[in-house]
Image: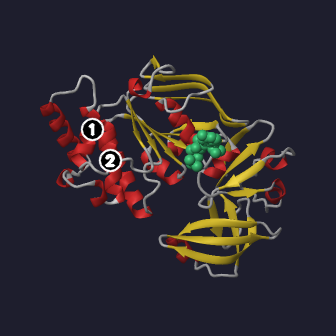
Amino acid sequence: MAIAVRNLTKRFGTFQAVGGVSFEVPAGELVALLGPSGSGKSTILRIIAGLEPADSGDVEITGEDASNLSTQQRGVGFVFQHYALFRHMTIRQNVAFGLQVQKPRPPASEIKARVEELLELVQLLVHADRYPSQLSGGQRQRVALARALATRPKVLLLDEPFGALDAKVRDELRTWLRRLHDEVHVTSLFVTHDQQEAFEVADQVIVLNKGKVEQMGPPQELYEHPATPFVTEFLGSVNVLRAETVLGMELGDEVPLPLDVANSNDNSAVYVRPHDFEITRQSNGRPAWSARIRKLIPLGGLVRLDLTLLDGTTLNVQLTRERCLQLALVDGEDIYVSPKDWKVFHESKRFVENYVI
Ligand SMILES: Nc1ncnc2c1ncn2[C@@H]1O[C@H](COP(=O)(O)OP(=O)(O)OP(=O)(O)O)[C@@H](O)[C@H]1O
């Protein structure tokens, strides 16, 4: 393991920002710490970097107990949201800085070669003699990354590195970062509050909520098998249904409802993702609701349907444009809607279960 944290806690006054967090980052992986604002992501990253002391718990970097080491001794590279480049230095000088202050200082020829290699890697060799003010925000973050990598850190910590950039540049930089990581394989921990960003970039995602780890795993696994209601609702949009709505379905003869779901009388919740529904004009033997189309909203290759069920429940359903054209759906008409897949959170069992119907 390149990074291991165990039972980290941190309070600010009476507020518990980090409440017993443990996880491991395997060597060479890019792992995202994902959570809403205030969930403790930056605090955890700063504790790992040695910029903030923990109240209790351990940090290991490449197998070594780092709890009592300074930031320099930990061998971490750090990239912040707001580029902390030196304004009076050229890009080349910025990237060389960490090497020039290293003890012992590497020979000048080695520094020169390493800086050229990094500028090539971040595709900024052509701008090597410019000053930070002469670069775009996205280019400056690439320089910040090259600078953080210059001293060959054991691990790279990135705190919302693209947070201050506009959506299009952010998007490009994500793809770029993923490709760069596939080339250099430096173990990286990446903080973001953006689910799409975490899913696009990371090998594994750690979902944080209120200073605690809710779940960790590869993106697709988290999406398909969320362990808690929080993860289910945080990762993409989802319809949350009451047990009475589920019991009010017209039961088909072919497919029985998983009755323990519908009959559970504790505070269970049933979740269905917008793309996990089937729309038909006739009842097709599957459990279904009769529903009215309140609005069809074209979204490029997809169409969003706002539906209302007889008990007043509203559903957000997504179909492909082809399927919508095939069914010739229009606003205001009545159709049948059946879930293909749902997730049930059992209050008594404390986990989310998947059902394919
Ligand atoms: N130095 C501090 N003093 C007091 N409270 C702090 C301090 N640093 C962080 N906090 C509080 O701890 C909580 C966690 O902060 P943190 O920055 O780790 O969250 P985050 O998940 O990174 O959020 P964001 O995405 O908004 O940066 C927040 O409620 C924050 O206000």
Up-down relation of residue 54 to residue 212 (above or below): above
Counting labels gives: 2
Residue 33 vs residue 336, the one in the foreground: 33
Where is residue 68? Give x, y as percent: 50, 19
- Residue 284 visible in the displayed image: no
Question: What's the mark number on residue 97?
Answer: 1
Label 2 sits on what residue type?
Phe
Q: 353 left or right of 27?
A: right
Please tell me whether mark 1 sits on a helix, a strand or a loop: helix
Where is residue 194? Give x, y as percent: 53, 52
The residue carrying pointer 1 sits among few (fewer than 14), some (14 to 19) or many (20 or more) residues within 10 Å by Cα, namely some
How far is mark 2 from mark 1, CA to CA? 9 Å
Residue 142 vs residue 348, the one in the foreground: 142
Question: What's the mark number on residue 110?
Answer: none
Residue drawn at 70 percent across, 36 percent down: 13
Residue at which label 2 appears: 86
- Residue 210 visible in the displayed image: yes
- Say whether marks 2 and 1 touch (CB < 8 Å): yes
